Image (cartoon, rainbow, N blue to C red):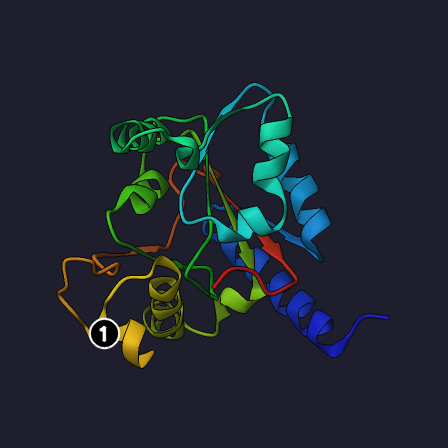
Amino acid sequence: MATPKELYYEKRGQILVKNLRSRHFEAYYCANKQEALNKALELIPEGASVGWGGAMSCEQIGLMKALHAGNYRPIDRSLAQSPEEREQMVRQMLTADVFLTGANGISLDGQMVNIDGTGNRVAAIIYGPGSVIVVAGMNKVADTLEDAMTRARTIAAPMNNQRFGNDNPCSVTGTCGNCKNETCICNQIVITRHCRPAERIKFILVGEDLGL
């Protein structure tokens, strides 16, 4: 029997899928990680070049492992042998067949918020790769766009700073300090409110807590 939390996520997921589709995104709701992995692989053609950035949720459903094991051409910057090779890989991702990402916040009416440090992730979301797949746990969903923005700035960004080990104010206080540090990861804040061309961006919403 489904738990109250699972039922809550499913009902909100149904609302969000409808709202995302009304904005010309492709959208699916998956109850768990395995369903999400199956759906993601269904959306990625064999032989495709695939890059990713800021995609903890994709990693948590086992997608990167499956791409490395399957008939795909993953662009994995973690395997770079030098800073120069890593930068080259990051640039290659901008023209990959498929780009994978998570989301820092999603409003229930279907708008996505992402914060980026260098901009490579949001750049790929906006333009370049032929297909973008967003894997997001339902913990990323907020009632309003303002709430999604707040989540991105005051929850996701401070936790990501801890993950990266940056010496920024929020790493110390746990609260956004609106800093201008050289290592600031809140340099680009992008709202994606509509998909053009239609269905280029595909959402896989997962009825579990994923990412930060």
Residue drawn at 39 percent across, 75 percent down: 147
Residue drawn at 29 percent across, 77 percent down: 172
Percent across and percent down for residue 190 are: 29, 55
Badge 1: residue crowd in 10 Å (few <14, some 14–19, many ≥20): some
Q: Is residue 67 left or right of residue 5?
A: left
- 203 or 46: nearer the eye? 46
Screen quadrant of the N terminus: bottom right
Q: Is residue 136 left or right of residue 94?
A: right
Percent across and percent down for residue 73 are: 51, 22
Percent across and percent down for residue 120 are: 29, 42
- 212 or 200: nearer the eye? 212
- 203 or 175: nearer the eye? 175
Residue drawn at 35 percent across, 26 percent down: 95
- 42 or 200: nearer the eye? 42
Amino acid type of the residue that numbered disc 1 sits on in the rendered structure: Pro
* Residue occupying the far front of the picture: 81
Residue behind mark 1: 169
Say what secondary structure mark 1 lies in.
helix
Residue drawn at 47 percent across, 46 percent down: 24
